[in-house]
Image (spheres, rainbow, N blue to C red):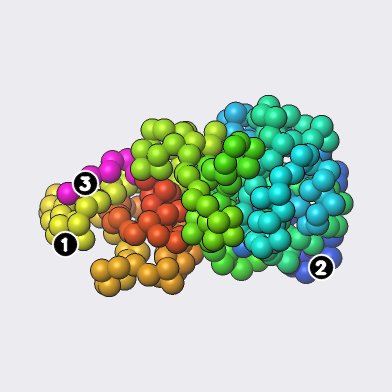
Amino acid sequence: MNRSFTRANGTLLLTDHSRSVARAAKIIKEGGLVAFPTETVYGLGASALDADAVKKIFAAKGRPFDNPLIVHLSDLDQLNCVARDIPGAAKLLINKFWPGPLSLVLQRSDAVPGVVSAGLPTVAVRMPRHRIALDLIRLSGVPIAAPSANRSGKPSPTSFRHVIEDMAGRIDAVIKSSFCAIGVESTVLDLTGPSPVILRPGGLSREDLEKVLGCQIHIAGNYENINLPSSPGMKYRHYSPSAPLFLITGPQKRRRYFIDALARSYQRKGFIVGMLNLYSNSSLVQEKDSRVLAAHLYQLLRRLDARGVDFILAEETSAEGLGLAIMNRLRKAATRIIRV
Ligand code: TXA
Ligand code: MG
């Protein structure tokens, strides 16, 4: 049996073998959908220049059409094809951070159909830091529009198994690879206004961006307020496991005491309680730790769901470094935020 071409519910399961990536590229060129690994999360790709192919992404994910997609590039020539009037700040950031987990919102060129950007005059672009993603884009010969490869509202997939769980039978192919190293999505930075604004905190820290741009960077809306959308995509409940998730915030000692007491009281009533045990015992979560937390966050949420827990209790973490992205995702996933 040729292992490169097995199927799950009709979806081709491809290995990261070069012949398989070429097969995936052919599917993209022909207007199909392929899920592929990146350094952040798995993406669900279609040719960014083909409006009909891009519409299939929205259908497969159950994604609202007013939530724009990120266009993935493998070289800088493609940047000039999809964006125009590129500001100096973009060039600085691209030099420093691409390929990597930074998506830049720029003015959209006419080559990109409106459906990619939900009709906005702008386009989000990034160059992923992953060999398979770059090979796929290069072999396809087109920029690839790709949201995360999960069903809309679910935690993003960080392993090909998560993609198969959500997408088997709904897309043409998945390229199987290892876990995504970063584990949360890219940082989305808007460069179309008078000053740069973070629309979605992500895999590149605000501190790193500020060092290169030499100014303070604001975060759109108030990331602590889950009801205030910043980027169009941020208004939907997101990253959510099926079980209700309670996020406990406040001073460390009080929140831990509260979590223990809450867990015990639910257990006495016969409920299965899942603890999102992300945190080290140190009182300060170091940047190094937040990288580990980010890498495991979505996988842990999916695992708790698979165990069939009735409730998930999660604890606040420091909002420094990747902690900002982690807190953003936990707030969006939370059914209730309890301050103690
Ligand atoms: O790491 C990532 O960014 C992953 C991988 C696959 O590259 N992709 C990803 O895509 O997370 P998605 O669709 O799940 O999230 C895209 C985010 C949404 O919050 C969307 O609203 C925002 O980017 N976005 C895209 N285009 C935009 C635009 N033109 N203006 C403002 N926000 C935009
Ligand atoms: Mg997503």
Q: Residues within 10 Å of mark 1 (few under 14, many from 20)?
A: few
Task: Indicate the position of residue 94 as horizontal and vertical percent values.
Answer: 70, 57
For the question of whether residue 32 can be seen, the reply is no
In the displayed structure, would residue 68 be above or below residue 89?
A: above
Residue 177 is covered by the magenta coloring: no
Instruction: Say whether residue 319 is left or right of residue 50.
Output: left
Q: Earlier in the sequence, mark 1 or mark 3?
A: 1
Q: What's under tag 1, amino acid-wise?
A: Lys
Instruction: State the quadrant of the N terminus.
Output: bottom right
Q: Which residues are magenta?
A: 334-340
Q: Residues within 10 Å of mark 2 (few under 14, many from 20)?
A: few
User: Label 2, on which residue?
Assistant: 18
> Mark 1 near mark 2, Cβ–Cβ under 8 Å?
no
Labels in figure, total? 3
Q: Secondary structure at mark 2?
A: helix
Q: In front of the other: label 1 or label 2? A: 1
Q: What's under tag 2, amino acid-wise?
A: Ser
Q: Quadrant of residue 283?
A: bottom left
Q: Earlier in the sequence, mark 1 or mark 2?
A: 2
Instruction: Write the residue at 66% across / 63% down.
Output: 96
Separation of marks 1 and 2 at Cα, in angstroms: 52 Å
Q: Secondary structure at mark 3?
A: strand
> From the Cβ of disc 3, is ligand 1 less than 8 Å away?
no
Instruction: Say whether residue 135 is left or right of residue 321.
Output: right
User: Label 3, on which residue?
Assistant: 339
User: Label 1, on which residue?
Assistant: 253
Task: Indicate the position of residue 215 as horizontal and vertical percent values.
Answer: 52, 52
Separation of marks 3 and 2 at Cα, in angstroms: 51 Å
Task: Indicate the position of residue 233 as horizontal and vertical percent values.
Answer: 54, 37
